[in-house]
Image (cartoon, rainbow, N blue to C red):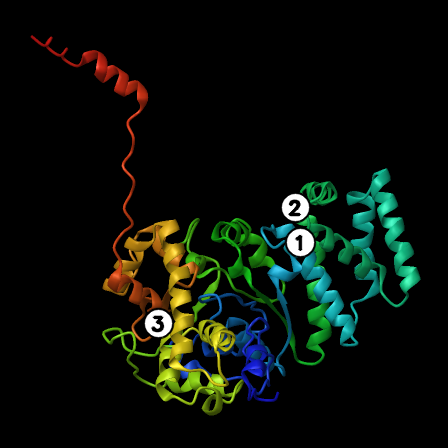
Amino acid sequence: MTVARTLAQATSALDFEIPLESGDPRFVDFASVRGGGSVERLKRRLLRLNPDQWLHAVFASHRGAGKSTELKRLAHDLGDRYFSIYFEASVELDAVSFEMEDLLLVIARVVEEQMRDRGTPLPKHELEKVEKWFADVIFNDEYGRQYLADIKTEAKAEGGIPFFAKLIGSITASMKRSSEHKETIKRQVKRFPGTLLTYVNNLLTVANKILMGENRRLLLLIDNMDRYKPQVIDDLLLASQDVFKSLQCHLIVTPPIDLVLRPKTQSLQNVFQCETMSTIKLRERDQDYWEFSGDGRAKLLEALNKRIDVAKLIPDAAVRDRLISASGGGIRELLNLAQDVTLDATGDVITMADLDHTLSRWRSGLRNQIDANGWWDALTEIAKLKRLSDDPKQLDVVFLRLAFQYNGEVWFDVHPLIAELLETHSPPKKSAKKKPAAKKAARKKTASPKKAQP
């Protein structure tokens, strides 16, 4: 990929929406500056499993910390031992909420599709068992029979795509949008809670048998669960924990970090192997927000250099340091902030005035968000103690990347721009509550009468 040498090119080059694929030249290994070795431990777990063991693991961090890129790299590094299937929950499922039945159907679809695409399709008789169950049990009314007939017609017209793929593809597409049809399907499937799991496990078992001929096994990587509200994922992972434990494949999921820090139903560690990835550390916990310690600064500068010509576009070293410090060590924060500055810059390079203008706008947005949600006390306490308390608002600010977890001996701190706001913060004045009119009237009745004027 060509490194951007103009601000116009840099705006696109700094986009962070798509995780890096393994082997992407922009990749930087941040393991040494994150600490904790979570990715390496996941890798060792998978390499040291007995043949009869399944790994069902949680990989958690702040959103935008780089989990997706690390998962893709893990899949590449283990390619000779595992056939990895990666998908994003927020893309394949309803973007607001989903249940175990939805996830099982997506797993069936992506496994069939990926095994077929690699030239080792699942046996037709196994797929027909699932088709028959849907025909006999789920779609056994007039509407359902017509639904199946329409899908068969589409499959014949397109050619080459199995009826199973069209059927499950159509169902999972329906599950992503609110409709009466979606609720009908879900009600029917829920009448037979173990049957769908049995059929999906049959498909997973067959896929693993095929892969064992290559001395490999199936690994599912389900990303972006951290984009859902914690309660949604708690209901999924813990209420359906027996289903997860029984899945016949290796599985890594990415829940919100909130559920690791403060479980709702029970600890995730009771069900899954848990690994947590920290934010890139730029300084020690007792240092000022704009100081540097260790290699974090150099690693983030390297990540910028792989996207833009930093020396040309940000020639002032002080501007570069200010930009990196303001990110707090978050790779998403750094790239988003740098991209914003390219849009604010008035010349051919980024100056301190340009950066200050962008940071001022970011601080204003953060202040308004904190004011509206009453987060000042929660953030002040994190900044002071460098740890979390039992205040539920502290998990809110961690979920929204207003505070980060750092490794070493694990500690927390607020976003550096919020630290600047805290230095000058005075709580907004609350308007005095007006006393109800009825009470005013009562007081008038009981008030002592004024003496008549002589």
Quarter occupied by residue 7: bottom right
Q: Residue at x 41, y 53 (%)?
A: 263
Residue 194: give x, y in percent of width and height: 66, 48
Q: Nearer the viewer, residue 262 or 380?
A: 380
> Image quadrant for the N terminus?
bottom right
Q: Residue at x 34, y 79 (%)?
A: 282
> Image quadrant for the C terminus?
top left
Residue under numbered circle 2: 193
**Callout 2 crowding tier (Cα within 10 Å): few <14, some 14–19, many ≥20:** few
Residue under numbered circle 3: 406
Alpha carbons under labels 2 and 3: distance apart: 41 Å
Residue 257: give x, y in percent of width and height: 44, 61
Q: Secondary structure at mark 2?
A: helix
Q: Secondary structure at mark 1?
A: helix
Q: Is residue 322 visible?
A: yes
Q: Amino acid at mark 2?
A: Pro
Mark 2 and 1 residues: CB-CB less than 8 Å, in contact?
A: yes
Q: Amino acid at mark 3?
A: Tyr
Residue 233: give x, y in percent of width and height: 52, 54
Quarter occupied by residue 220: bottom right
| Badge 3 or badge 1: first in the primary sequence | 1
Q: Secondary structure at mark 3?
A: strand
| Badge 2 or badge 3: first in the primary sequence | 2
Q: Nearer the viewer, residue 148 or 423?
A: 423
Residue 326 placement, left or right of 214: left
Mark 3 and 1 residues: CB-CB less than 8 Å, in contact?
A: no
Residue 71 placement, left or right of 129: left
Alpha carbons under labels 2 and 1: distance apart: 7 Å
Q: Which mark is residue 197?
A: 1
Q: Is residue 47 above or below residue 267?
A: below
Alpha carbons under labels 3 and 1: distance apart: 39 Å
Residue 230: give x, y in percent of width and height: 48, 53
